[in-house]
Amino acid sequence: MILIQKHFFMLNKYSGYNSKFYLKIGTRFVYQINTKKFLKTTINCGQPTYETHPHLLCKNEVIPGIKKEEFLSRQRSLMRSVVTRKSDVYHILVIPSAVRKYMSDHIPYPFRQNSDFLYLSGCQETDCALVLFGDSDSNFSSTLFLKPPDPQAELWNGPSSRADDASFIFGVTNGKILPQLSSFLTNKIQNHKKCVLWYNQKQKVQSFVDKTVNSVALENKIYINDSLDNHCHKLRLYKSSSEQKLMRKSCQIASKAFIKAMKSTKPGSTEHELYATIDYECRMGGAEFLAYPPVVASGINANTLHYIDNKQKISNGELILVDAGCEYHGYSSDISRTWPANGKFTDTQKTLYEATLSVQKDLIEMCHARSSLDALYDAMCYKLGKALSEAHVFKKNVQDPKDLAMLSRTLCPHHVSHYLGMDVHDTGTVKKNIEIESGFIFTVEPGVYINQNNNFVHDEFLGLGIRIEDDILVTDNSIEVLSANCPKEVEDIERIMSISNN
Ligand code: GLY
Ligand code: MN
Ligand code: MN
């Protein structure tokens, strides 16, 4: 009923409904008085809601799996993070949404929301902004600035959320239209003696918001604090239990897709077909899209770290390195596996693969609290060198830990881990040397890439490329491998590949 009271000023006669029995709430919702229920509306609100897409969302969820309360609690935590001590200072936090981008005239790319904005609002609209305003985590408001109604744009792009509906759909305090942003900010600054304006200048997410914030700051001679992304990333680093569930599911979907891809691999097929299998299976599993352009690299293509060409024919006897993940309701998985095109590792391939796998498993055991992503990297450098040396991959007998680490760095030029969540390389402003804590999710992904000019290894290993990447959730009691269903033991891969998809 709180919502009803909030919207009381908006009640009016709803066409087609008798106003004695029904109340119109905002622009698009109808409340049935005698049953005390909101009627399912077939009117699209700009993004799926419980009312229009009950197969995707439960009651009170703003995006699948995340309830209104959680968004409020995220906003509160962000306020707590920026307000260092209670004083008479007011804080204005401006977070822009992403804009629609076009691949060519009037042809949009699939839209992907700015993660900080989505994290705080749950809003999937383009060209809008969220503003938090207050002096503490117990005294603040959230205002969502949405696009003004534009029937011509809606004819092409479909309905968009209305400012009137913002508090109902998103649980924000109120909604306004984006052209009101400038006067809103000016008003707050001029009516409060001490204000801090928080806005991330490093990445220009939306030029309208960027210009507005900068010109308001200039006109009112107010300094812009540029570290809002850092505050937001620190919150996003700790995955809540609902986020953990979404991440678990994202990893499960991708793991299943990998199994299908392994089963469908055969010499003579193409990297492109494996890409298509993974894309198809992820979407059929419920993911919106792949989390990034996948690497599907057969043979020596695996030595190109960001190989996304994915057009080569797969030859008998080659290994295939696939790095792929999906985005499930805003949460990304990121998995790499390497398997033989014909379903059976050669002895040489197996030697290199087993060495990499043993290091990867050792590193996962180290993923407890008090370790760090950088500590994993340092451990990888030494352990990988040692494992390859023991497997007689190098021509010379290398023993010195420094030499082993140096060799590893040349064979694996990337870090072994990054945080994972809404973004694939999640919370990029958070350092990798901080201690791992309960709720962190990150990858463990050692690789070995031996290009054909390498002089340190025996010839039989030249051209091979291997990466094994899992997604790890650390909690107080466990190290959970979210991608555990994706096979990585040699016997498991070979067994799975001997069973056809049909
Ligand atoms: N797929 C990108 C990465 O593993 O970092
Ligand atoms: Mn990764
Ligand atoms: Mn990856």
Image (spheres, rainbow, N blue to C red):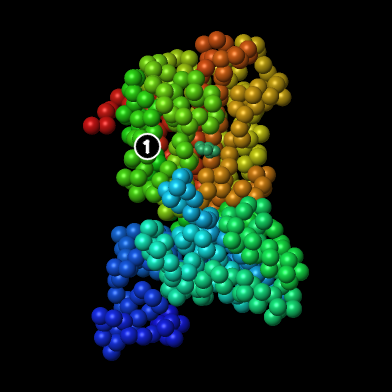
**On the rendered structure, is 56 left or right of 118?**
left
Residue at the spot 55% in from the left edge and 10% down from the top edge: 459
Which residue type carries mark 1?
Ile
Q: Quadrant of residue 164?
A: bottom left
Counting from the top left corner in percent of width and height, residue 155 is at: 36, 61
In the foreground, 487 or 171: 171
Counting from the top left corner in percent of width and height, residue 95 is at: 59, 62
Q: Is mark 1 within 8 Å of ligand 3?
A: no
The C terminus: image quadrant: top left
Q: Is residue 449 visible?
A: yes
In the foreground, 489 or 193: 193
**On the rendered structure, is 442 left or right of 346?**
right
**On the rendered structure, is 18 left or right of 323?**
left
Residue at the spot 65% in from the left edge and 70% down from the top edge: 92
Residue at the spot 26% in from the left edge and 82% down from the top edge: 17
Q: Is residue 235 visible?
A: no
Q: Furthest-bottom residue in view?
A: 20
Residue 361 versus residue 333 in the image, above or below: above
Q: Secondary structure at mark 1?
A: helix
Counting from the top left corner in percent of width and height, residue 6 is at: 46, 82
In the foreground, 318 or 43: 43
In the foreground, 65 or 201: 201
Residue 129 versus residue 459 in the image, above or below: below
Counting from the top left corner in percent of width and height, residue 226 is at: 70, 58
Residue under pointer 1: 278
Residue at the spot 70% in from the left edge and 78% down from the top edge: 190
